[in-house]
Amino acid sequence: MEYIKGMTWGWVGTRGQWNTEEAKQSMTAMKDIAVNWTAIAFQGLQETAFSTEIDFKNDPVVTDDEVYWAIKEAKELGLNVCLKPVVNCKDGTWRAHINFFDLDVPCEPKWSDWFKSYEAFILHYAKIAEETSCEMFCIGCEMVQTDRREKEWRELIRKVREVYSGPITYNCDKYQEGQVKWWDAVDIISSSGYYPIDSWDEQVARIKGVVEQYDKTFFFMEAGCPSRTGSPNVPNDWNLNKGQVNEEAQDAYLNEMFTKTTDQKWINGFMLWDWPAVLYPKEEASKNDDYCMYGKKAEKTVRDFYLSK
């Protein structure tokens, strides 16, 4: 498999922001930093971490037509596409906390009900991924409390393979690479690489052991750092020091991450986080403190690294 020089596009997938001239210009600008892959990422929504119904048909979730449009635009730019539907909670709880009793109990929300809804959500988009010849399909993202439900995940993967013929990955959360016991069922192992800037050697060594155990292709489905003071130490914290813009911090983080991973041949690339469908004006890049590197010092760092691979 070719080295994944990727970027996540379109998050969170808000209805009306795709299939526009602005979104088209965003994707074209993303292509200019030498990417060869994009993860088209969007959300389905459940009310809370303890709800069992996932809504992927209503506003603000992007429409199927918008998903088709994004895939078509990416392919016309020559990009490989990983379709990445992701569950979010409307109340703001991070999806990693979606959880239920291990034993089904009457009158309580149940894993069985949740997985039934999640299966409908994932299979819907797996069929679109097949229809549009997406080069990869991601069946889940950072679902930490669900990871232990091995039987349900294996059954979901079996059903996805009935409708999608391409490679399947699961995006586990940071530090969880060794906790997933069903890596053998997917084609590609991927994780969110939001590791402190000074811990890359330690984390790379740890993850390598997991990858060697399963003998699978591995890449970082997410990785990046906000352009804020302090973010290199906690790159997963998107609320840290809100407003303290620091382009150099983001650039230093990405440089260190690339340096520590480039000689690790088993790491097959990155799907960096992230590139929104609606970009801020380039002249205002110095005021933006988020993960996107458009117009920032880190944009050149990413482009140079991808061109070198």
Image: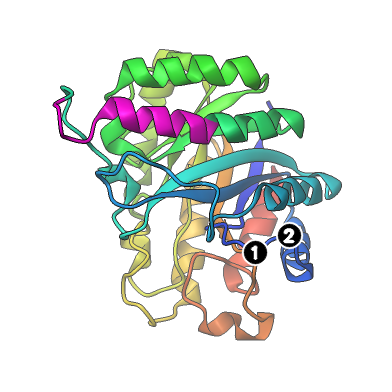
Q: Residue furthest front?
A: 107
Q: How many marks?
A: 2
Residue that label 2 marks: 27
Tell me, yes or no, if residue 174 can be seen here: yes
Question: Which residue is pictured at 57% across the width and 61% down the height?
Answer: 14
Question: Which residue is pictured at 61% across the width and 30% down the height?
Answer: 126
The residue segment tinted magenta is 105-122
**Where, by quadrant of the figure, is residue 115 drawn?**
top left
Colour scheme: rainbow
Residue that label 1 marks: 277
In this rendering, which labeled residue sits more in front, label 1 or label 2?
1
| Image quarter hosting the C terminus | top right
User: In the image, residue 56 lies at what x, y percent?
Assistant: 52, 46
User: In the image, residue 28 lies at what x, y percent?
Assistant: 78, 61
Specify whether 195 is left or right of 215.
left
* Above/below status of 158 relative to 84: above
* Above/below status of 278 relative to 131: below
- Say which element carries label 2: helix
CB contact under 8 Å: marks 1 and 2 = yes
Tell me, yes or no, if residue 178 can be seen here: no
Tell me if mark 2 has few (under 14), some (14-19) or many (20+) residues whose alpha carbon lies within 10 angstroms of its own: many
Dominant secondary structure, magenta: helix
**Where, by quadrant of the figure, is residue 206 drawn?**
top left
Type of amino acid under label 2: Met
Q: Residue furthest right?
A: 76
Question: Which residue is pictured at 39% across the width and 82% down the height?
Answer: 243
Nearer to us in this view, 114 or 75: 114
User: Disc 1 versus disc 2: distance between alpha carbons?
Assistant: 7 Å
